[in-house]
Image (cartoon, grey):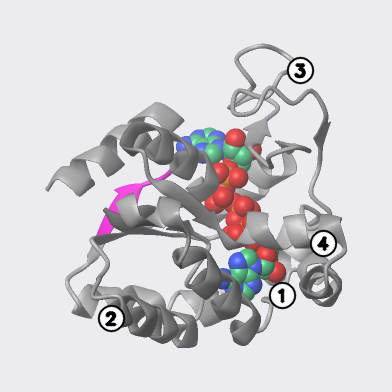
Amino acid sequence: MKIVLLGPPGSGKGTQALRLTKAHGLASLSTGDMLRAAVRAGTPVGREADATMKRGELVPDEVVVAIIGERLTQADCARGFILDGFPRTVAQALALDGMLAKAGQKLTKVIEFKVNEAALVARISGRFNCVKCDAAYHETNNRPKRDGVCDRCGGTTFTRRPDDNAQAIKVRLDAYRKQTAPLLPYYRKKGLLMAVDAMADIDKVTKEIEGALAA
Ligand code: AP5
């Protein structure tokens, strides 16, 4: 399976990607996680992306396309993958189509996370992330199974993302509306788009996605 998760910031893409990759043995490709790792490591890409991400704006297409292009050639992607946060512009979608076509592959499905924007601010402002693997939790909706221990990697230190503040959230939502939402008609035309109610609780959203994937 080659799946794209498409939805605004805070809609639950990362949370569901974690569950789906575990359940189906797929590689998880989150451009946000990869960029944050590059920022932490102080690589040239990370140094270039840092300020842009803090403002909540999109990193240039050529930067993320290069990251994904390199990642897709790694062995664990051969069994299938979940793209979380990529593509985010029509130019990125076209680049992805080109990369997959070159490898004789195509996307299986694109899952749209349908949400009420007003709920997103509460979700994002209650979020905290594992420092080691970036897994996302929430103060009330989604705590780690053992308090203070990351379910995914066992890490014990958590942090809040620097772009999870009111000003950056506004910019991120605007970027979604203007630059990413045009991907919905793009994938609908290709017959790949399936929408799920991402306002439901986390388990229900997982069930709905599994249903969409099986359809
Ligand atoms: P990225 O890391 O991709 O962030 P995002 O798209 O803004 O999405 P989020 O990670 O904020 O939310 P999510 O949908 O994953 O929700 P989550 O599961 O965490 O990108 C960050 C930045 O990197 C961008 O702004 C840009 O600068 C750059 N970037 C990345 N990719 C790029 C690209 N392709 N091109 C250009 N630039 C790029 O859930 C949110 C919270 O809600 C959590 O606390 C969670 O526990 C909780 N929650 C989840 N589901 C539910 C539910 N159903 N009910 C209640 N609570 C829930």
- Magenta-drawn segment: 194-198
View extreme (front): residue? 75
Q: Which SS class for mark 4?
A: helix
User: In screen coordinates, is 120 left or right of 46?
Assistant: left
The amino acid at mark 2 is Ala
Say which residue label 1 marks. 57
Quick one: label 3 or label 4, which is nearer the N terminus?
4
Which residue appears at 45% of the width and 67% of the height? 73
Q: Amino acid at mark 1?
A: Glu
Under mark 4, the amino acid is Val
Q: Is residue 155 above or below residue 205?
A: above
First in residue order: circle 2 vs circle 4: 4
SS at badge 3:
loop
Q: Which mark is residue 39?
A: 4
The image's mark for residue 148 is 3
Nearest the viewer among 164 and 34 is 34
User: Would you say the beta carbon of the disc 1 residue lies within 8 angstroms of ligand 1?
Assistant: yes
Of marks 3 and 1, which one's residue comes earlier in the chain? 1
Q: Which residue is mark 2?
A: 101
Depth order, front residue of 44/114: 44
Tell me the distance, in whole angstroms, between the alpha carbons under discs 4 and 1.
15 Å
